[in-house]
Image: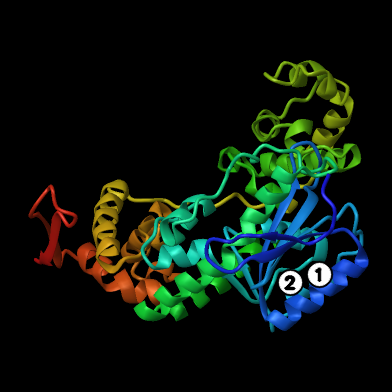
Amino acid sequence: MLTSRLIPVECAMAPAKDEILISTPAQLRELVDQVRAAGRFGFDTEFVSEDTFEPVLCLIQVATADRLAVIDPQAVRDLSAFWELVHDPKLEVVMHAAGEDMRICLLHTGAVPRRIFDVQIVAGLVGYSYPLSLVNLAAQALRVALSSSETRTDWRRRPLTTAQFRYALDDVRHLLDLADHLEAELRQMGRSDWAEAEFADFLAATLDRADQERWRRLPGLHQLSRRGLETARRMAEWREDEARRQNRPLRQVMRDDLLVAIAKRQPSSRRDLEALRDFNRPALLSKTQAILGVLEQARAVPADRLPELSQRPDDSPGASTVASLLSAALAQLCIQHKVSGSLVANVSDLKHLIRWYLDGRPEHDRPALLEGWRGKLCGQLLLEILAGRRTFRVVDPASEYPVALEPA
């Protein structure tokens, strides 16, 4: 069983740091004071989301220059002082692949940090693969080996084992060293402003996704009529209410594909509904009458109050071929400039650029590939390829740069 005593541990990158399990309000107050004095900290969380409506926060890991700490939310119920640290713009919050941790932060505080440094994003900006796991990033950048032996552990169980404790700390043990290493590369390459722009976009996208109605993210909505969309909306609300009441994940109440299938087929009787594949589970069969009531409510909505159809881009017949050509050019450009191509753009970004070009370059819909650091890196080249002013020529299939992009 772990206690909250200090445990000195050797670190490969720096002198030994104290390791502590925070299990009392007094210990948390002391840690908060230390973090404020340090000016920045590494941050990570462990949570379990497999069988509850919302993820259960199990641990919070914190790293400063001289201390590693695991906060136990089961022992310290009031975490408001810590969350104030996360939101303090004077403090830099160093993270790796911050998406899920931002979700936890939003759930518990309703906001996201204002100042982050995500080492996964920065790694992509200075030539590492993106997205790169913490284990691989630490190995490549710092030559440090991290364990992955506790990836399937149940973080809700107490007491924590020594192996769980050390594994949890490994998630933040080298974050500050990674940040220092990668920030030095950023400055050397003159890309600090690239990172700041990416952090701002990431936080904005996190908030936008949180504000977006959850039902609008259901896969397959493009198959539905406006009446079907109304049915999907109401079914999603019913499912969420049921999941919250039962404290179960949404997918355990009803899978997304079944929900969309119900919205598409519009069953009007018990027999029609129960004839749907995968509906024959006892938990769903017991809700047949309630679901039929939701469907009836959706059918009663006047036509002029139905949701608008989901807009799907209408790509030209050759869009996929052109996107492949642009992708090949972009890949070589990214290798030459030491930036991860998957961080610069995906296929959807390239097709957006093609649509914008064919639509007459409307100013209100400028693609992300033409803005900010992406525009400076590759915007002009991609436009020249679209305009036929650049050609491809294979110069050496065995080379790291097998293709030449030359003026037409």
316 w.r.t. 178: above or below: above
Mark 2 nearby-residue class (10 Å; few <14, some 14–19, many ≥20): many
Query: What residue appears at the point 68 percent right and 50 percent down from the top-left corner?
Result: 166
The image's colour scheme reads: rainbow
Q: Which residue is mark 2?
A: 86
Q: Position of residue 236 (x, y in %)?
A: 76, 42
Q: Position of residue 354 (x, y in %)?
A: 33, 60
Q: Amino acid at mark 1?
A: Phe
Q: Position of residue 393 (x, y in %)?
A: 9, 56
Q: Position of residue 96 (x, y in %)?
A: 58, 60
Query: What residue appears at the point 90 percent right and 59 percent down from the top-left corner?
Result: 76
Pick whichever, 341 or 302, lies toward us.
341
Residue 283 is tagged as none
Residue 82 is tagged as 1
* For residue 235, side relative to residue 144 (left or right): right
79 w.r.t. 399: above or below: below
Residue 306 visible in image: no
Residue 255 visible in image: yes
Image quadrant where residue 203 sits: bottom right
Q: Report how far apart the C-alphas of labels 1 and 2 lie in the structure.
A: 7 Å
Indicate the quadrant containing the N terminus: top left, top right, bottom left or bottom right.
top right
Q: Amino acid at mark 2?
A: Val
Element at badge 2? helix
Image quadrant where residue 93 sits: bottom right
Element at badge 1? helix
